[in-house]
Image (cartoon, rainbow, N blue to C red):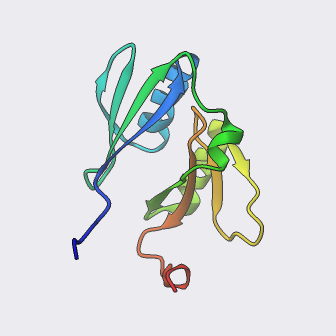
Amino acid sequence: MAQVSIGNHSKIVAHYADQDNIRAFYRDVLGCELTKQTENVDYIRFKGGFFLAVLYQDSAPSPEELEKAIWLELRSDKVVELRKKIVSFGVEEIAMPGAEHIYFHAPGGQVFRLVGEGEDLSRFES
């Protein structure tokens, strides 16, 4: 049987109007590097070599639609500090029943969960 793993590239679609907030959030709040910035696409590099492409279009999923789609997990060695920066930026927190982590809409609508680097999450694996 073939072996499968998740790669280190992903993409989201966002409205042109969100471009400045998206760039500021990923660069200034999360500390990512914007390796490419054009009118229609940004490439964002996270620590560890994960790349996120943001495709800017006139039509993009709404935050409500994105709550039903895949969410991404952010890991940090300074969760409390980063959580404060994220909330201070003005993101919309998402109430997840029974959740012990913060879930939020980043600019553009993508849903993230913030967890601690090295946090034992094995309870979600079986």
- Residue 87 appears in view: yes
Say which residue appears at 55% left-offset and 79% top-offset: 124
The answer to whether residue 26 is left or right of residue 83 is left
Quarter of the figure that contains the N terminus = bottom left
Kindly give the residue lying farthest to the left in the view shown: 2
Say which of 120 and 125 sits in front.
125
Locate residue 87, reporting x and y percent: 66, 46
At 75% from the left edge and 72% from the top edge, which residue is drawn? 98
Query: Percent position (x, y) of residue 19?
Result: 50, 21
Based on the displayed image, in which of its 4 quarters is residue 108 positioned? top right
Q: Is residue 91 visible?
A: no
Residue 92 to residue 117: above or below: above
Task: Name which residue lies at 45% across and 28% down.
Answer: 23
Residue 17 against residue 2 in the figure, above or below = above
Question: Is 120 placed left or right of 97 in the picture?
Answer: left
Q: Residue 123 vs residue 12: left or right?
A: right
Query: How far across and down, in percent of the image, does residue 56 sit?
Result: 46, 21
Residue 41: % across, % down: 37, 23
